[in-house]
Image (spheres, helix red, strand yellow):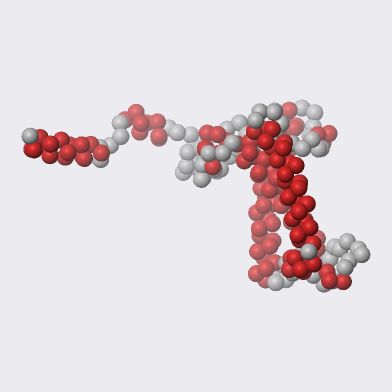
Amino acid sequence: MMKLAILSTIVASAAAFAPATGVARHTALNAEKSQALPFLPAPANTEGYIGNVGFDPLRVSDYMPMDYLRESELKHGRICMMAWAGFVAVDAGARIYPLPEAYQGLTSVSAHEALVKSGAMGNMLVWFAIMEMVAWIGVSQMLQGSGRAAGDYGLGHQFMGKTDAERDAMKLKELKNGRLAMLAFSGVVTQAVLFDKGFPYM
């Protein structure tokens, strides 16, 4: 009886290292590949979304609603488009007058500490928090099936075009510009801090 138990254990252990069946191997090899990362399978939940190139290496779309992720992408992209323009404008000499004496001669990098000391950053934090809380109402309704499109705040529809193709083209342009702006803002801040120089930061 003991010999039979040992033999069963050995066979079971060996079965764990047996290759997968031919059907499973065939399915894995034929899985659609990501356009952006061709060495990874395409994330299924991103299908049907404008601008989808299968870029989701961490598979975040498997765990979070895609509408919420698209809302976040659009919001971050829009913020970075404005942030890049504002950062460069200040370093290129643009100012809003009358300018408080404490803000004289500040660059985009050095302005942070001065604005924290003066309390302006705290005020901005409060207003941004209020805006986020109000915006969450629309996001929450969207996630509950209200039909609201991700990132749609009801502004600028007159510039979107008349046909579905024109509207989709404009949405793709905004998405691509937002993605570029996220990289550009990261780059401009890094360059400005590393070289401690104004525009063009070289």
- Number of callouts in the render? 0
Taking the spot 79% from the left edge, 58% from the top edge, the residue there is: 123
- Residue 181 appears in the rendering: yes
Q: Is residue 68 left or right of residue 78?
A: left
Q: Position of residue 197 (x, y in %)?
A: 72, 71
Image quarter in which the N terminus is found: top left
Q: Is residue 16 left or right of residue 200?
A: left
- Residue 198 appears in the rendering: no
Taking the spot 78% from the left edge, 52% from the top edge, the residue there is: 127
Q: Position of residue 125 (x, y in %)?
A: 74, 55
Does residue 163 lie above or below 78 as drawn?
Answer: above
Does residue 73 lie above or below 154 as drawn?
Answer: below
**Of residues 189 and 141, which is closer to you in this image?**
141
**Of residues 187 and 121, which is closer to you in this image?**
121
Q: Quadrant of residue 104?
A: bottom right
Image quarter in which the C terminus is found: bottom right
Q: Position of residue 87 (x, y in %)?
A: 76, 60
Furthest-right residue in this view? 98
Q: Quadrant of residue 17?
A: top left
Q: Position of residue 198 (x, y in %)?
A: 75, 69
